[in-house]
Amino acid sequence: MPGEMSHRQILQALTGLLAALFTAMLSTTIVANALPTIMADLHGTQTDFAWVVTAALLANAVSTPIWGKLADLFSKKLLVQLSIIVFVLGSVLAGLAENMPVLLTARVIQGLGMGGLTALVQAVIGSIIPPRERGRYSGYMGAVMAVATAGGPLLGGFIVDSPLGWRWTFFLCVPLAVVALFLLQVTLRLPHTRRKVSIDWLGSILLTAGVSLLLIWVSFAGKAGYYDWLSWQTAAMVGTSLVLLALLVFVESKVSEPIIPLKIIRERTTALSIVASVAVGIAMFGSTTFLGQYFQIARGFSPTEAGLLMLPMIAGNLMGSVGSGQLISRFGKWKRFLIAGTIMVIAGTGLAGSMDHETDMLLVSLYIFVLGLGMGLLMQNLVLAVQNTVKVSQVGSASASIAFFRTVGGAVGVSVLGAVMSSSVSSRAADGLRAANIPVSDGGAGDSLDIGSLPPAIQGIFRAAYGDATATIFQISAVVSVVALIAVLFIKEQVLRRTLDIQPTPPAPTPAQPGMTGASELMHSGAGPTVPGESRSAPESAGNAGPTGSGRTADGGPTG
């Protein structure tokens, strides 16, 4: 049985699971510093740049709850292996892509595989480790996440600068996934108890269609050759999306096992944490996505150097996460860290909003360190706050809801910020070209990321445009982060419980009937009933219960 596994057996099983988790996380971070080079090679636009990230995030978010439901129907081990295979297929296709449509399709497939790994690794860990012992293994997961987060950008930059080229940022994950597949087959032993569940396919379709339509609308609105912000296309797409999302809420309120559990997310702490998580997702994914572009395009650093320049933010993230975790475990208080984290995120994004193409790199490092520290204080502690308010049976759904909305927030944020970035770069580049008496085409300027192919004089104009436009991204993120602060302020703090599950609240005491006061106090003190003729001294904590004996009644009065 899973609960009877020894420490050694659990570690063996965790080896394959953590290898799969490491592969999924690395695939996300390793591509960040390769994207500018990929866009230049495949002739992608700023919109394509955002969608390479958005496509994987959206597929990940939407598929995560579906994989979780499938885990109740079929073998978790088989599903983890299947998700790895899906991920490998997407990685191979991405590495072989010769144009943007193929790359975007591959990223969707990768996202589906990552969604499976995200949902199923947690489900399997819950199946092999008893809840009371789960904490002792959390350090292994933390180490894996730290290495993947810190090492991904550096490794991606190194691969792009090496003779291997950017395609190996995708290919490298394939052997890692195969190793994880082999380890899972050898080490993981899981009994499968099948129970009857219903998968909310209609909710999944409505969610995917509603969110995707909004992302498509915001990605192309206002761009030359497409449609204006105020147009019939906008009305049709936004209106249809709102109808689909309204239908989603209706469906989720009726089905037995909704893809989004409305009962849980209506709870005050969970609802406010979701609002804060969406804002944090925008700041987190937006910063990591566009910072690499800022370092390489606006400042002219190589992909490897861009990875090194991201280290201050990663260091701040780890310090905030580890430091706050230790202090929260010691004192049981967590809200102060959420407030401090949101303030730092606002400060970090606000300071980064003052950057341009000539900002001193020491200042840039300081800005992103503050931002990383704030995210470290927020991300896991928001999940912890929610887990502390729900029953053990609901921890998985509540945690998945936070992760789901944070990922969707990140996808929406990257898409929206990408659209703003494209528009701002195009406008700034056109102004710069006009100021230099260089003709501007009717289609505008700034649509291509292949800056290296431009003449040196024009390169300078475009680099300045990208550098200055990046500030707009962080300014918007700072405003959105204020929403997170407001949400956190309204969260009601509850001291972290020491028990595994929520303990039932004892019923309120009813007014004691005459002659029963002493008896109730004795029962409360644990002294128990007295037997006539038996001398028994009451404990001191019994208070005014008084001694009892053969000549006394239970309330301490004389016998009649």
Image (cartoon, grey):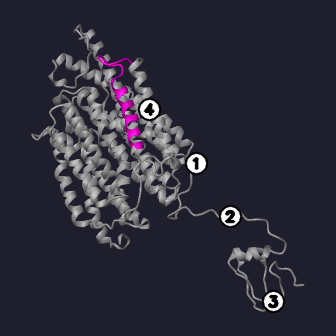
Mark 3, secondary structure of its residue: loop
The residue shown at (25%, 54%) is 82
Label 1 to label 3: alpha-carbon separation: 52 Å
Look at discs 4 and 2 and give the one toward the viewer.
Answer: 2
Q: Are marks 1 and 3 in contact (CB under 8 Å)?
A: no
For label 3, the crowd category at 10 Å Cα-Cα, with few meaning under 14, some 14 to 19 and many 20 or more, is some
The residue at which mark 4 appears reads as 478
Magenta residues?
Answer: 202-228
Label 4 to label 1: alpha-carbon separation: 24 Å
- Residue 440's place in the image compared with 18, above or below, is above
Three-letter code, disc 4? Ala
For label 1, the crowd category at 10 Å Cα-Cα, with few meaning under 14, some 14 to 19 and many 20 or more, is few
The residue at which mark 1 appears reads as 492
Viewer can see residue 555? yes
Upstream in sequence: badge 1 or badge 3: 1
Upstream in sequence: badge 4 or badge 3: 4
